[in-house]
Amino acid sequence: MAPFKDHFSLQSDAYRRFRPDYPATLFEWLAAQAPGRRLAIDVATGNGQAAAGLAGHFEHVIAADPSAAQLTQAAAHPRIEYRCEAAESISVASGSADLLIVAQAAHWFDWPRFVEQARRALRPAGVLAFWTYGNCVVTPAIDRLVADFSRDVVGPYWPRERRHVEEGYRDLVVPLPALEAPAFEMRTRWDAAAMLGYLDTWSAVRRCRARSGRDPLGLLVQPLSAAWGEGLREMRWPLVVRAHRN
């Protein structure tokens, strides 16, 4: 198995503060597809954001992540058990999980090995679901600024696995029957400072800063603030959700 590539531990606190929440309707739909409500697993849980969404629907949630630093940012919950382990090494009994999810992290995995583990862990008719999202949608002017920044300024610093996100996970093969998911999106209201905080969690921004010795966000502060204006703006991130039944 390839070594764990930790792109987020150094910004684990910022990741907790500046990542939008997944919609409650997503977890309601996932729970409705599962054959039971006893056990759900969230791999690459990070700060436990998606695990918290599952906890309202399942008796027990196992939330695993190979980054101990990320797990220190996770909120305790009586139904969530946090484990420091990789997605490719899920330490649960075979055929025990009703649902197994991956939120915005499937592109980092040794994919064939993970799928093998997921199929082993899921009970018959259990559901494997994973999702991703790209740049947020605010206004055409702001969206262009962010897209140009992502491509032209920090583009060379994105890890190669980013291509799976750009493909909308269409290239991640699962040899199981697919479920058609409704449209979901994350929504929030931020000011320009919060938006810059979110961009600062991008792995490409951190890599650019570390390797070049310059802060790429310095190029974006003035034009983004001018386009944003005062106060809060509505923001949304459309989700690409893929789900399969074991």
Image (tube, rainbow, N blue to C red):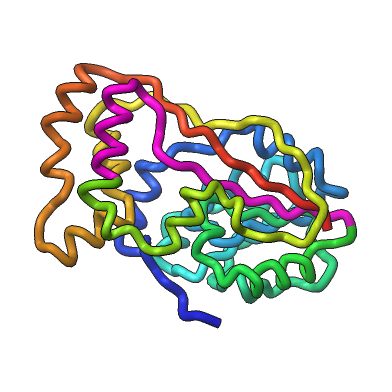
Task: Decide: is 172 above or below 236.
Answer: below
Depth check, front residue: 74 or 32: 32
* Residue range highlighted in magenta: 125-150
Rendered position, 152 above or below 102: above
Work out whether 244 lies above or below 118: above
Q: Residue at x 69, y 40 (%)?
A: 56
Count of numbered marks: 0
Residue 44: % across, % down: 54, 61
Specify the quadrant of the image occupied by residue 22: top right
Residue at 24% x, 38% y is 196
Relative side of 26 to 84, left or right: right
Residue drawn at x 36%, y 24% as measured from the top left:
138
x, y (%) of residue 78? Answer: 64, 52
User: Where does the image place residue 203, in percent across and percent down from the top left?
Assistant: 33, 57
Q: Is residue 128 magenta?
A: yes
The image position of residue 4, as x and y in percent, is: 46, 75
Question: In the picture, which quadrant includes the C terminus?
Answer: bottom right
Residue depicted at x 39% and y 65%: 69
Instruction: Find the residue positioned furthest to the top.
Output: 230
Q: Is residue 209 left or right of residue 77?
A: left
Q: Nearer the viewer, residue 147 or 199?
A: 147
Q: Nearer the viewer, residue 199 or 156?
A: 156
* Residue 138 on the magenta segment: yes
Q: Quadrant of the N terminus?
A: bottom right
Figure check: 85 above or below 190: below
